[in-house]
Image (tube, grey):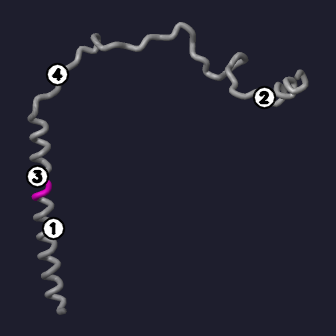
Amino acid sequence: MPPVVIFALGIVGAAALVRWCSKEVRRVNAELNNVRARAAVEPVDRNALPTLKRDRKPANTGRGKNSFRSFPRKRESRRLAQAS
């Protein structure tokens, strides 16, 4: 095919693509405007909502001397084995 024909087909294709994109943008913007035009949700009184309450004791964070361990350490397991 001659280069002029290929160039003309490219221009026609680009024009069709630009036209389709502009229609799509207009359609999406129309949908967004419809959603924006709907009534907004009524504001909620924040003081009327239930709140979380603090625990009386602090949670065990797994740090320190008295932290919970799900498995015994090696030394403790040896002592347990020797004791039984």
Read off the residue under disc 2: 73
Which of the pair 17/53 is nearer the observer? 53
Sequence order check, earlier mark of 4 and 1:
1
Read off the residue under disc 3: 27
Residue pictured at 10% horizontal, 53% vertical: 26
Question: In the image, 26: left or right of 51?
Answer: left
Sequence order check, earlier mark of 2 and 3:
3
Q: How far apart are marks 2 and 4 (CA)?
A: 57 Å
Read off the residue under disc 4: 42
Per the rendered image, the range of residues in magenta is 23-27
Sequence order check, earlier mark of 3 and 4:
3
Residues marked 4 and 1 touching at CB (< 8 Å): no
Q: How far apart are marks 2 and 3 (CA)?
A: 66 Å
Mark number for residue 47?
A: none
Q: Which of marks 4 and 1 is in front?
A: 4
The amino acid on which the numbered mark 4 sits, given as a three-letter code, is Glu
Query: Eyeballing the image, is 33 above or below 25?
Result: above
Q: How far apart are marks 2 and 1 (CA)?
A: 69 Å
Residue placed furthest toward the right: 82
Question: In the image, 23: left or right of 71?
Answer: left
Q: Nearer the viewer, mark 2 or mark 3?
A: 2
Mark number for residue 17?
A: 1
